[in-house]
């Protein structure tokens, strides 16, 4: 069974030989820490841990065009104040780049929206489609590739939240709902406009995408930033437009990346055709893949759902969770891996224990699994 067949069969609840072995990724500080613990420096994480081919994707540029010019606004010794390419001003430690502290936003109101952002979201900008996109497609055509391939489908709200800030966009829903709806509509038009071109070129060059990826970090530990009724009224129509377009080209799965407590939004997303939840962050609210399968049924597929904090605990705790999730793996519609990027407090020893056990239990120790690397001894 090829990796593509395995992924599609898993999501369609059809027989598979084993579970795909994937991960989410790692904090920028994690790999250097593991290299000090014996991970070779001359090998990629995918090769060292023996992952299946993962996260291969094509698509157009769905961001700000042109982007803002990145620049250092102030040097404070251990930290810098920087203007990011998305117009956000951040304070960032020079030695720690994973989680900066955001302190200001270019997008504040209608005036800044119209002056600085709306023109950067034109779906007709020819620069949105890579000049060599047809060549990329031919290299990944259905009759060539053996791995699952994704297409970027954008963001309806999550990027707006980034550009404006959590509190600011939450208040905008009440202070200027017409502006927020216009912004959401613009993002929907961007996704649909670019996808129409991308999907047509892909089809003409032999590519059927296996899934689409969307990014919508719009929840926190209590639930969504804006109310479900607003999401239903303002956002759902755009999800429907996107999912219907994708399905017309044979792409039946939309993997939506949203951290936080997503419970109230899951029914809306499922009704709109957004059917794979990722990374299913466990959090303090106690999300659980097994519970969600009982609650939402097989229409909701899941990728992720392994509590990253368990990886920093004992090997026994890791083992217990791998086996707890095994029945859901067997049921299908579920590809388990860490519920966010692996933080640096997870030891290399623990992660190696996790990945070896995942291959044994979820991967059934089959011969086509890629080997897991071994740490090298550190010089004194």
Image (spheres, rainbow, N blue to C red):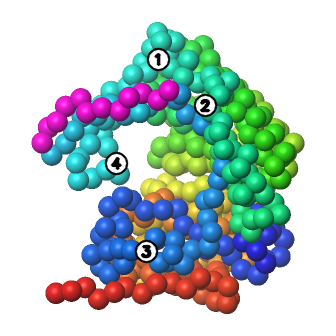
The range drawn in magenta is: 66-77
SS class, disc 3: loop
> If the image is split into quadrants, where does the C terminus sit?
bottom left
Label 2: how many residues lie within 10 Å, few (<14), some (14-19) or many (20+)? few
Q: Earlier in the sequence, mark 2 or mark 3?
A: 3
> Label for residue 127?
2
- What residue sits 67% from the left and 90% below the top? 367
Say left or right for 160 vs 71.
right
Q: CA distance from mark 2 to mark 3?
A: 34 Å
Q: Residue 46 at x, y = what percent?
A: 51, 71
Look at 76% across and 81% down and name the residue there: 17
Task: Give the CA separation, mark 3 to mark 4.
Answer: 25 Å
In the picture, measured across the screen, residue 266 lies left or right of residue 164, that is: right
Instruction: Find out whether the residues at labels 3 and 4 contact each other: C-beta distance under 8 Å.
Output: no
Q: Disc 4 marks which residue? A: 99
Q: Position of residue 313 (x, y in %)?
A: 37, 75
Crowding at dot 1, Cα within 10 Å, few <14 / some 14-19 / many 20+, comes out as: some
Q: Which mark is residue 43?
A: 3
**Residues at marks 4 and 1, CA–CA distance in whole angstroms:** 25 Å
Identify the element where label 2 is drawn: helix
Check disc 1 and report the residue beneath it.
116
CA–CA distance in space, label 2 to label 1: 18 Å
Query: Which tag, 3 or 4, sits closer to the chain's start?
Result: 3
Q: Residue at x 52, y 56 (%)?
A: 281
Res 215 label: none
Which of labels 2 and 4 is toward the front? Answer: 2
């Amino acid at each position: 069974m090829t990796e593509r067949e395995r992924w599609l069969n898993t999501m369609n609840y059809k027989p598979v030989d084993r579970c795909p072995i994937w991960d989410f990724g790692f904090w920028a500080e994690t790999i250097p820490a593991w290299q000090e613990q014996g991970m070779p420096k001359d090998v990629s994480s995918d090769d060292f841990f023996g992952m299946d081919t993962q996260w291969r994707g094509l698509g157009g540029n769905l961001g700000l065009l042109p982007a803002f010019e990145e620049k250092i606004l102030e040097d404070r010794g251990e930290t810098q104040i920087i203007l990011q390419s998305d117009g956000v001003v951040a304070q960032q430690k020079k030695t720690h780049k994973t989680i900066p502290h955001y302190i200001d936003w270019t997008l504040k109101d209608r005036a800044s929206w119209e002056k600085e952002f709306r023109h950067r979201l034109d779906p007709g900008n020819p620069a949105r489609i890579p000049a060599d996109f047809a060549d990329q497609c031919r290299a990944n055509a259905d009759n060539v590739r053996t791995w699952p391939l994704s297409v970027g489908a954008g963001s309806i709200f999550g990027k707006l939240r980034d550009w404006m800030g959590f509190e600011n966009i939450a208040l905008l829903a009440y202070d200027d709902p017409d502006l927020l709806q216009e912004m959401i509509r613009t993002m929907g038009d961007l996704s649909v406009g670019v996808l129409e071109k991308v999907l047509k070129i892909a089809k003409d060059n032999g590519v059927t995408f296996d899934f689409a990826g969307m990014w919508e970090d719009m929840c926190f530990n209590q639930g969504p930033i804006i109310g479900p009724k607003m999401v239903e009224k303002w956002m759902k129509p755009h999800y429907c437009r996107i999912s219907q377009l994708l399905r017309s080209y044979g792409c039946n799965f939309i993997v939506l990346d949203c951290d936080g407590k997503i419970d109230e939004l899951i029914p809306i997303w499922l009704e709109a055709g957004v059917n794979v939840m990722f990374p299913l962050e466990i959090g303090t609210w106690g999300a659980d893949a097994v519970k969600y399968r009982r609650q939402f049924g097989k229409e909701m597929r899941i990728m992720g759902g392994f509590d990253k904090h368990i990886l920093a605990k004992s090997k026994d705790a890791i083992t217990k969770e791998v086996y707890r999730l095994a029945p859901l793996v067997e049921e299908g519609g579920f590809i388990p891996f860490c519920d966010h990027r692996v933080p640096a407090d997870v030891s290399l020893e623990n992660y190696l224990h996790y990945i070896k056990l995942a291959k044994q239990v979820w991967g059934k120790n089959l011969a086509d699994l890629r080997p897991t690397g071994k740490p090298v001894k550190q010089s004194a």
